[in-house]
């Protein structure tokens, strides 16, 4: 069974600084997606960034980028120039690339932005 | 384009009662999934529907059931409620016909409290 591990329950960062959230996963599959979702206090889960396993290039979305290490099964999220609006729970998630596959989530990292 | 809509947003029930939650996916999305989110267990997959058929099911008792209608709207039902069913129930939609990016789009959730 696939598992996703987020070893940092809480992180904090000064506004405008950079922070990295860690995620490791375990799978025997070769074709899958990895995601970082953000859940602010309003609680709607919002996609931050996605990575397809077959792509070696790390995904980037504005201030958000990932470090995808397929062999090490590691998928960290880097947030640059942190903003107050980045404060939220961040969930790392895995999904096998097959039509009916579920998302397997990590336990989440609560990110606090210090003004 | 409207997002995923869940109703009701909040509800309070007593033990032994049953509850029905509704989810309207993004227009054109054919797959609807349900997740339960609790502080203790995190995010857990309930089931997934596609074209009115349940394609995948998580490890929940038979008290949890769901269905999908021809317009892709979905409902989930929990019968004989227990205190442990108190949770945020999240619905997610995906798969615009012919386009599968793997990501799920989430609604704001239905907060169920069982007394």
Image (spheres, rainbow, N blue to C red):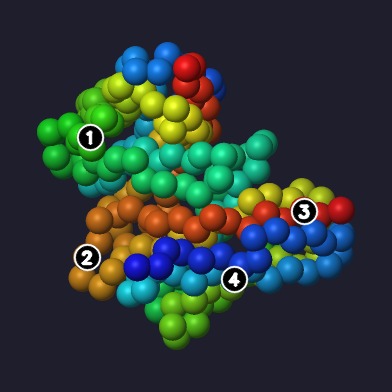
Q: Given the image, what chain letter belongs to the residue carrying mark 4?
A: B
The local secondary structure at tag 3 comes to strand
Q: Between disc 4 and disc 3, whose residue precedes? A: 4
Q: Given the image, what chain letter belongs to the residue carrying mark 2?
A: B
Residue placed at 25% from the left, 56% from the top?
A: B101
The local secondary structure at tag 2 comes to loop
Q: Position of residue A82 (x, y in %)?
A: 36, 23
- Cα separation between marks 3 and 2: 37 Å
Q: Nearer the viewer, mark 1 or mark 4?
A: 1
Are discs 1 and 4 both within one chain? no
Taking the image as drawn, is residue A76 in sight? no
Q: Are marks 4 and 3 in contact (CB under 8 Å)?
A: no
Residue placed at 77% from the left, 53% from the top?
A: B113
Which numbered circle lies on residue A62?
A: 1
Q: Is residue A46 left or right of residue B21?
A: left
Q: Are marks 3 and 1 in contact (CB under 8 Å)?
A: no
- Cα separation between marks 3 and 1: 38 Å
Are discs 2 and 1 both within one chain? no
Q: Which residue is mark 4?
A: B22
Seen in the picture, residue A82 relative to A41 is either above or below; the reply is above
Depth check: A65 or B65 in front?
A: A65
């Amino acid at each position: 069974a696939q598992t996703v591990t987020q070893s940092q329950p809480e992180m904090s960062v000064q506004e405008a600084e950079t922070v990295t959230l860690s995620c490791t996963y375990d799978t025997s599959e070769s074709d899958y997606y990895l995601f970082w979702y953000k859940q602010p206090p309003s609680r709607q889960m919002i996609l931050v960034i996605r990575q397809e396993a077959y792509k070696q290039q790390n995904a980037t979305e504005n201030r958000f980028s990932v470090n995808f290490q397929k062999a090490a099964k590691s998928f960290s999220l880097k947030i640059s120039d942190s903003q107050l609006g980045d404060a939220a729970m961040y969930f790392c998630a895995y999904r096998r690339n097959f039509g009916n596959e579920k998302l397997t989530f990590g336990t989440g990292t609560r990110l606090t932005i210090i003004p | 384009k409207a997002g995923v809509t869940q109703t009701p947003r909040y509800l309070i029930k007593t033990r032994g009662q049953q509850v029905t939650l509704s989810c309207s996916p993004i227009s054109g999305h054919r797959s609807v999934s349900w997740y339960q989110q609790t502080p203790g267990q995190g995010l857990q997959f309930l089931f997934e529907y596609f074209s009115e058929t349940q394609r995948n099911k998580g490890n929940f008792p038979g008290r949890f059931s769901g269905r999908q209608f021809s317009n892709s709207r979905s409902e989930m039902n929990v019968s004989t409620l227990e205190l442990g069913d108190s949770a945020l129930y999240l619905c997610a939609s995906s798969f615009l016909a012919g386009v599968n990016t793997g990501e799920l789009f989430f609604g704001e959730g239905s907060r169920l409290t069982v007394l």
